[in-house]
Amino acid sequence: MNITLKNVRTYEGFSEETVAFVASIYVNGKKVGDAKNKGQGGPNDIDVFSKDGRWDKDLKNKMESEARKHTWTYESETHPHNLDSYIGKLVDDFQEQRYLKRLCRTQTLLRIPNQTYKAGEYTAIKLKYNQNVKARAIKTWGNKVEILNESFKKESK
């Protein structure tokens, strides 16, 4: 089972303790519900419905089981997600990808071989990405240099 979010809209101005958002929930490519959070610290509101528009408790239970297969780590302890926290993680991932795409419009983000990076961390070159910048990066750091702008370029095709 593959749970994804589409049509994600975040509302930074309304976010106080949690991220305010609305999104459509998809399972294996089919829309099965909606999720939202008012941004005031409570859990996510998750509605899962059947083809005829009625509440589908069985599907939501299956989604809960799927979410528990995914984990998160805090202070070196690993914990299973529940559906609420997993939806929150998907929203966080969406926000991070949107932020990185925005950065890639005006600069080049890369990972230099033999350097250690944390998740979501990159070296930034304040040059807009193009083939000349790519060639210069490869000449400087070799073919193993990872250029984040390349992955966003492939997504947009």
Image (cartoon, helix red, strand yellow):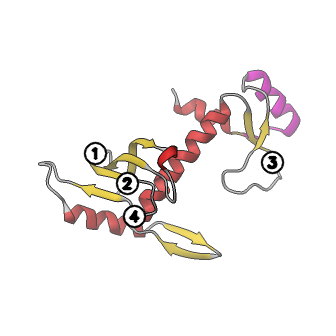
Give the magenta range: 131-146
Task: Specify whether residue 75 is painted magenta.
Answer: no
Type of amino acid under label 2: Asn
Pick out the residue farthest to the left: 52
**Position of residue 36 in the picture relative to residue 109 (left or right):** left
Q: Is residue 84 left or right of residue 103?
A: left
Label 3 crowd (10 A; few <14 / some 14-19 / many >=20): few
Could one spot residue 144 in this view of the protein? no
The secondary structure type at the circle numbered 1 is strand
- Residue 43's tag is 4
Q: Position of residue 135 (x, y in %)?
A: 80, 27
Q: Residues within 10 Å of mark 1 (few under 14, many from 20)?
A: few
Residue neighbourhood size for the residue with mark 2, other residues' Cα within 10 Å, grouped as few (<14), some (14–19), many (≥20) = few
* x and y percentages locating residue 6 in the rendered image: 39, 42
Q: Which labelled disc corresponds to residue 75? A: none
Return the disc, 4 or 3, that comes first in the chain's sequence: 4
Dot 4 surroundings within 10 Å: few (below 14), some, or many (20 or more)? some
The residue at which mark 2 appears reads as: 2
Image position of 156 (left or right of 1): right
Label located before the other in sequence (2 or 4) = 2
Q: Nearer the viewer, mark 2 or mark 4?
A: 4
Q: Which amino acid, by three-letter code, is at mark 3?
A: Pro
> Tag 1: residue type?
Lys
- C-alpha span from label 2 to label 3: 32 Å
Residue at the image point whose x is 49% and y is 58% from the top: 18
- The residue at which mark 3 appears reads as 113
Q: Tell me, yes or no, whether the two marked residues, 4 and 3, touch with CB atoms within 8 Å.
A: no
Q: Given this view, does label 4 or label 1 mark the residue nearer the observer?
A: 4
Distance (Cα) linking label 4 and label 3: 40 Å
Q: Please tell me in which quadrant of the rendered image residue 103 appears.
A: top right
Does 137 appear in magenta?
Answer: yes
